[in-house]
Image (cartoon, grey):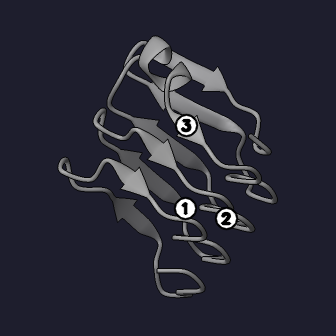
Amino acid sequence: FSENQNLEIANIPLEVSKLGAGAFANCLNLKVVSLPDGIKEIGFNCFFNCASLERISYAGTKEQWRHIKRGSNWLAKAKTTEVVCVDGPIVVNPYH
């Protein structure tokens, strides 16, 4: 999906456990991403430069989020640095 300028919403299917490196990089119009609680890994530069990204929703808890492996710069240069979990929002480090 990288560099897809038409993509505004990404609903990741339940069976997906890993988002690869650069999967959504430079999707400048991506605004909303919904992640299932089965996500185990988010790759390097996955959401890099998603300048319009306003919301990342995660179907798990804050504690589950802390166990997800995130590659470097996974959220760098994105509009948001917050993930909304089922038990509330959490501020994340966009670089790891």
The residue sitting at 31% across, 56% down in the picture is 12
Disc 3 to disc 1, C-alpha distance: 23 Å
**Position of 12 relative to 66 (above/below):** below
The residue sitting at 36% across, 41% down in the picture is 39
Viewer-side residue, 89 vs 37:
37
Question: Residue tagged by mark 1?
Answer: 31
**In front: label 3 or label 2:** 3
Task: Categorize mark 3 by other alpha carbons within 10 Å: few (<14), some (14-19), many (20+).
Answer: some
User: Mark 1: which amino acid?
Assistant: Lys
Tally of numbered tags: 3
Question: Residue tagged by mark 2?
Answer: 52
Look at the numbered disc 2 and give the secondary structure of its residue: loop
Question: Residue tagged by mark 3?
Answer: 69
Viewer-side residue, 39 vs 80:
39
Q: Which of marks 2 and 1 is nearer the N terminus?
A: 1
Determine which quarter of the picture holds residue 59: top left
Viewer-side residue, 36 vs 66:
66
**Position of 73 relative to 69 (above/below):** below
User: Mark 3: which amino acid?
Assistant: Lys
